[in-house]
Amino acid sequence: MADSPRLPSPRASVADAARAISPVLVLVAGAHFFNDIYMGFLTPLYAIIQDKFGLSLSMVGAVSMIAALASALSQPFFGLLFDRVGGAASIYLAPLLTGVLVSALGLAPSFGLFLVLLSLGCLGSAAFHPKGASVTPTLSGSHPEVGMAIFSAGGNLGFAAGPAVIAFFISRWGFGATPILAVPAALVAGCLALLLPARSARRKMAAPVSLRSLVQDRHDLVMLGRLVFINFCLNVGVRGLSTFLPVYMAHQGVSVTAIGGLFTGMLALGAIASIFVSQLSRRTGKRSLILLSAAAGAPLAVAGYLLFPHPAGIVLIIAAGTILTFSNPLLILQAQKHSRGSPAVASSLIMGLSWGLAGLAMVPLGALGEIVGMPAMMIVAAAFPLLCVFSCRRITRD
């Protein structure tokens, strides 16, 4: 009787995963960190620009929407463009553009120029994500899950750190000194240009494809739509936490520092958890963990809202945010699996389209809160991920 194949031991699996973390992969994740840290700057800046340019609340809201449109909903267009024409250099030029332009916002003499700098900086961020996500799996060998988790964690940690970094910097040196914050982006871009030049990056990416190739297989197209819907539902839950709960907490007399610490901790834990969950998916499969993210995260969020401001409610809210976000790299990999050789487009659908739509969903949720009250509206937002549980069960097994 032939010997049955041996499964790798857990210790060997961890060792292999550690070897998959190459210096170039860490640099790409670092570029993602700094790319998204500049996007995290925007939250504290809204109050500053309202005072500087004399903006109404509706104009402040318009600035937020412009940033969302430029940084998220434009990603599928960049993904399609890069999958067709290459654009390998965007892996380091895009975060450099983001860092330079967003850091220059403090020098804008007028609201019009502020919007131009912000829009172009957000477009740089949008251009980075599809290409960064498409090259990451090839940098981690036989452990693409580990590579994608580290890439995703870099962005989440950067976005979480952004508000604290810009608030501290402005409090010490003023809004006009922000251009110096472009230095980290320039250093990371320079290192990537040396260690992953465009020619080398191009060899690690898929061959150019056409839009017709992407949509010709109905099964893959339906699966991509299903994955976008799942990530949209999960992100409505997360954005509901991060958009409305701070307002509610402020009404309860919670300090800004405590609010910032809560959400920084939540996003950081989600980023760290995604690395371990991605490695676990090699044993359990991605579908079961994505299903767990929706089915467990939403009830925990609802319970947290109901118990808040009791400490148990805060713990449950942090746990909910962590669980709702740890499946993000798994969804990106699943989308790339059904992209028919168009990984940048697939990545942009998950990181751009679904995130952008979730951001726009905050408008009707806010209107609902004005009708039924903020506590009831937050329950709706917390329970929203349950809408995708059936879709999670329809994901193909890997």
Image: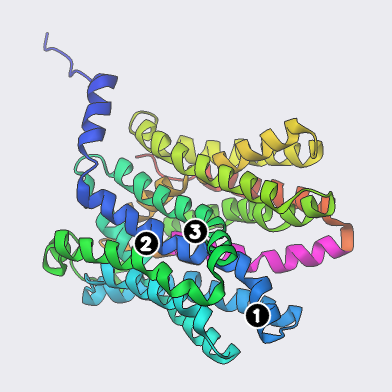
Q: Is residue 150 left or right of residue 203?
A: right
Picture coordinates of residue 72, whole percent (x, y): 49, 69
Residue 247: x %, y % from top left: 76, 57
Left of 87 or right of it: where is 70? right
Residue topped by disc 3: 228
Residue 96 seen in this snapshot: yes
List the residue tagged with mark 1.
62
Distance (Cα) linking label 2 and label 1: 28 Å
Closer to us: 325 or 180: 180
Image coordinates for residue 115, horizontal then vertical, percent: 54, 85
The type of residue carrying mark 2 is Ala
State the image quarter where residue 66 is shown: bottom right
- Closest to the observer, 55 or 2: 55
In magenta, the rendered stretch is: 349-370
Kind of residue at disc 1: Ala
The nearer-to-camera label among 2 and 1 is 1
Q: Disc 2 or 3, which lies upstream in sequence?
A: 3
**Of residues 261 and 120, which is closer to you in this image?**
261
- Disc on the earlier residue, 1 or 3: 1
Report which residue position mark 2 lands on: 346
- Residue at left offset 71%, top offset 37%: 314
